[in-house]
Amino acid sequence: MKDKTIDYIFRTTWLAINKMYNEEAAKFDTTMATGFVLINIDRENGTPSTSLGPKMGMEATSLSRTLKNMEDKGLIVRKPNPEDGRGVLICLTEFGKEKRAYSREKVLTFNEAIHNNVSEEELESFFKVADIVNHLISNKKIYNQNETISNKNE
């Protein structure tokens, strides 16, 4: 794997995880995106629709489409936000709570499998690298500052 680029490793790994989750979700007539949304909705109080997208890194159009499908399937309901008269809370139905529990179980199973096969030291290194990559990207330090690219070699 050392001859592969870092972005290639991230991309192919994410695609494999995405495929795995979608295969599991398909067994229950749903998708990974739906499961991801279910997990990110507060079980008891609901979640403002405006905070879901940023929380999950989803584009507004993708999230709107996913929420519409979830509403059609009876997983969620939209309620006025009592704290913000203009806003909407996305709330889980009882059926949505059941599906959320299933989705959460799948995520925990994945995490447990990784923890059982990767040392704590390796995981700490992985998390550190992922944090650095996210920091560089979110702070636009890869393509906006030429000196960032060569920092490691100095």
Image (tube, rainbow, N blue to C red):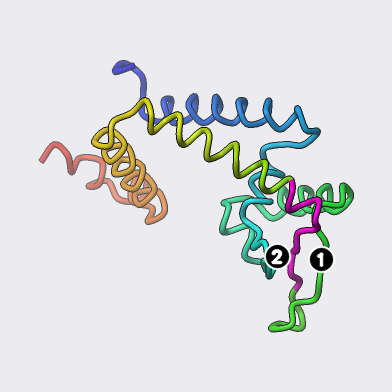
Is 69 rendered above or below residue 60? above
- Circle 1 is placed at which residue position? 78
Inspect the image, locate mark 1, and give the three-letter code of the amino acid beneath it: Arg
Picture quarter with the N terminus:
top left
- Name the element at disc 1: strand
Foreground label between 2 and 1: 1
- Circle 2 is placed at which residue position? 49
Count residues near mark 2 (Cα–Cα under 10 Å), then give few for <14, some for 14-19, many for 20+: many
Q: Is residue 91 magenta?
A: yes
Count residues near mark 1 (Cα–Cα under 10 Å), then give few for <14, some for 14-19, many for 20+: some
- Name the element at disc 2: helix
Residue 116 falls in which quadrant of the image? top left
Drawn side of residue 81 relative to residue 10, left or right:
right
From the top left corner, tell me how far across and down residue 60 is, in percent: 69, 55
The magenta span reads: 88-98
Q: Which residue sits furthest right?
A: 72
Residue 89 falls in which quadrant of the image? bottom right
